Amino acid sequence: MIKKLLCILLSSVLFLCTFSACGDDDDVSLVMPISSDPLCLDPQIAETLTAKTIINNCFEGLVRLDKEYKVVSGVAESWTVSSNGLEYTFKLREDTNWQLLKTYKDVLDDENYMENFKTQVTAHDFEFGLKRAVDKITDSPDADKLYCIKNAQKIHNGEADKSTLGVKATDDSTLVITLERPDPDFLRILTLPLCMPCNEEFFKATHAKYGLELKYTFCNGPFYLGRWTVDHSLVIYRNEGYKGNEKVKPTAVYFNINKEEESVISKLKQNDYHSAYISDSAKFTLEDTKMNFAVSKNSVYGIAFNCKDTFLSNENLRKALVMLTKTEGIETPHQAIDTAKGIIPEACRYANSTYRQAAGNLTVPKYDEVAALELWNNGLKEIEKESATIKIICPQEYLGIIQGIIQNWQRVLSTSIVAKVEAVSAETLKDSVRNGKYQLAVTEITANSSTAFDMLKIFTTENSKNIFGYSSPEFDGLLEKIIRTSAGAVILTDIKKAEQMLLDSAVFLPLHNHGDYFVFSSEAENIYASPVFESICFISGGLS
């Protein structure tokens, strides 16, 4: 206990000493709150927002995203792609290195490791990292993103040895990646933590503890992890030896654990924090300040249909209700951003643009009272009922909107429907939807990944996040096709086809875009977030 208190005290003293020098352009420290410690800083298996934020600042992949979300050089200074789109050849910089720390003395079995360890980041580090990512033993949650690489899927399924992966370091500075099929999104995928390099010698020296503690974390990025005080803070420091397209400006970034949003808001106002993730409600409390905001349209609010409900298990009944819902010109609640144009959130990316820009908008079923009434009557006959009792639960801000919608249902369907709406608390709504104890609910679906395809996975039959009770062999089969065989432009076509299938089957009717907010204090500048806020980039961050 005394040791832990001493660590916290020393960390606090260091924080105060560093922070006092913020006026010096060459000695700037930034502070950001996080809700908890990262579970692990192993890039190949990282899942949490905190872990990905730290990894994306402490590791450098072959390529990276700039503040415009464009793919730019990372460790690879250049690359070429074959005419058939199947072979990528990366030429790596020869002046990038792993950051050696004194804490590695307990890990590396060499008294003179500071002199003897070869620190150059090589193509072999990327080959080893990618092979780890698809290895069944690693159990990476994002391994399917790499299925386009030759033999990746077979390796992940245990059907082939990882040595057969289409990734080969032909020398220290050349990496060749061979794909099974062309994928226009492949370069963006290479910017993800999953694809970061891993030094095989260091990895093996950790004896299965890679990324679990400071001394087991090996960094090659613009920053390196230099302090990790459990339940208190993590600190990343500027890598003075970093070679890249941008100069690393901050001396350090402090990630202080703070679970209380009220405290976070207070510290932002006092400039004790320079950036933070905040909720919708918190954003409105800061609108009159001089702070700046970034918004990610990473959520879509809409009407979710419980496909396991007695009435709504019938697709004709669901379709009829959708066809009787006028979504054009619908009121936009205060906390919403604008009208949704699809099920996949607008923050999701595909290749060098947003998914929505690449795929276009969904085709919403045309409002048609005659066709809807016919579908409704057919649906009632199929379930052998004369009428249906429907209840919608929703947030308070959607109450008036839903009242107007069900009044129209009742006008057209007359006595064959008994519909009502109930406004419930956010907690009650979340619990009801998660446990499948609802018929219809105005709820949100949120992207935790910038990859558009990931959003569709929650609608598959076996997915634990499938709150809709939706089960369609056709839909599941289409997603399998996208993962296993779709190539080139067909990938985008099939993703949009799957998205349209959900709308046509009346599983989820999108209404409005909502989003998460990232706030910057009045003196913070040049900090930028990734598309759905999976990470925050501090490389150019500073204080005005």
Image: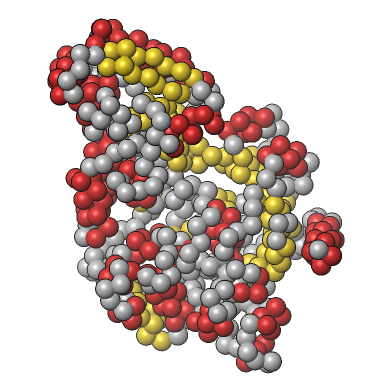
Which of 387/87 is in front?
387
Which of 392/168 is in front?
392
Q: Is residue 250 visible?
A: no
Image coordinates of residue 543 in percent, x first then y, are 72, 51
Instruction: Tell me the residue at 51%/29% (across/down).
Output: 428
Image coordinates of residue 461 in percent, x first then y, are 29, 46
Image coordinates of residue 143 in percent, x first then y, are 38, 63
Instruction: Tell me the residue at 84%/65% (across/down).
Output: 2
Q: Is residue 152 above or below residue 489?
A: below
Q: Could you tell whether 182 is left or right of 34 in the image?
A: left
Instruction: Tell me the residue at 70%/78% (across/down).
Output: 103
Instruction: Find residue 115 and report its image quarter.
Output: bottom right
Q: Quadrant of the N terminus?
A: bottom right
Q: Could you tell whether 113 is left or right of 471 in the image?
A: right
Task: Give the mark count.
Answer: 0
Q: Is residue 511 above or below residue 215?
A: above
Q: Is residue 38 above or below residue 160?
A: above
Colouring scheme applied when the structure was drawn: secondary structure
Q: Is residue 543 visible?
A: yes
Instruction: Find residue 280 and report its image quarter.
Output: top right
Instruction: Tell me the residue at 24%/11% (across/down).
Output: 416
Instruction: Find residue 445 and report its image quarter.
Output: top left
Image coordinates of residue 310 in percent, x first then y, are 28, 26
Which of 518/352 is in front?
518
